[in-house]
Amino acid sequence: MIVTRFAPSPTGELHLGHAFSALSAFAAARMAAGRFLLRIEDIDLGRCRPAFVDSILTDLSWLGLVWEEPVRRQSEHFDEYRAALDVLSAQGLLYPCFCTRKDIAGAGQAPHGPDGPLYPGTCRNLSPAEQLELRESGQPFALRLDCAEATRRVGRLVWHDRFAGTVVARPELFGDFVLARKDCPASYHLAVTLDDAHQGVTLVTRGEDLFAATHVHRLLQALFDLPVPDYSHHPLLTGPDGRRLAKRDHAQTLRSLREDGRSAVEVRAMVGLV
Ligand code: GLU
């Protein structure tokens, strides 16, 4: 049984690119008599807004999508993410990182990975006593994965993408990436990987801007012994200026199209999915 999902973050209004992604996932499930899920990825409590959750539900219903209830909201599952982190911690694969963004950006000519400057590993070498002292002084910290060690333990990993074919996972591109942020007990990479497995998703449909993220999601699947879904990282829609659509481009939001009198049928035709 095919299970697909659309997993928006309520940090802005949905635009045509989201409509394409959601409709593609919905169509893939419907054509195979499968299931379609909606998940609200709202772990970033500082940036997510309840009003955008309402907009997402309104826009998707208007487009004609039907999803299973209840809708999973990540902010209601922080305990599960913490428990998963404890598993990796017990395996000696996590370490607290007290560095600020400035520390990392200022640490020389650090090469960049898909999520920004690669972490130079400063806090990986703190002694247990130094870690304890910093924790006790109340300094906020993130939790990072010792990526080299994790990769060594799981060996070579691959995944299948409907556009790119068989892809060899290269989590080392991300260095020691963050699994729990200072301001939030989970990261996107952790929550999305656990939730896709928890919800039984068999096909992850999302824009190709998230293609690289799958390198680390595949590593996490191996570490947590989770099933590996199929992936469909589709090309991104671009605006009239040739640039990819973003939440800041208000003209192309589904809400504005609707308020301008466009019908759902017209909007589906605009993204080529009628
Ligand atoms: N929540 C992510 C976003 O809105 C997408 C996550 C995913 O599809 O994996 O960009």
Image: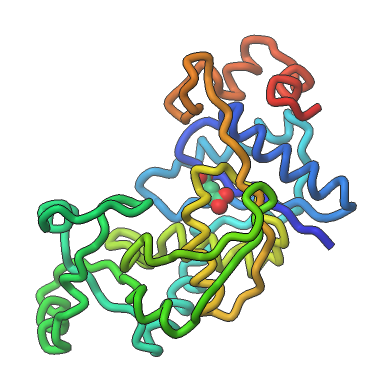
Q: Residue furthest top?
A: 260
Q: Residue at x 47, y 71 (%)?
A: 81
Q: Position of residue 145 (x, y in %)?
A: 35, 73
| 136 lies left or right of 119 | left
219 displayed left or right of 181: right
Quadrant of image for the C terminus: top right
223 vs 55, left or right, is left
Residue 22 visible to an observer of this rendering: yes
Q: Is residue 178 above or below residue 117?
A: below
- Percent of width and height locating residue 197: 63, 68
Q: Residue at x 17, y 88 (%)?
A: 128
Rendered position, 270 above or below 211: above
Q: Position of residue 147 (x, y in %)?
A: 36, 73
- Asked where in the image residue 266 lies, by quadrant, the reply is top right
Residue 9 appears in the rendering: no
Residue 184 location in percent, x, y? 35, 61
Number of numbered discs on residues: 0
**Quarter of the image that includes the N terminus:** bottom right
Report the side of 13 relative to 97 (left or right): right
Q: How is the image coloured?
A: rainbow
**Foreground residue, 266 or 145?**
145
Residue 181, image quadrant: bottom left
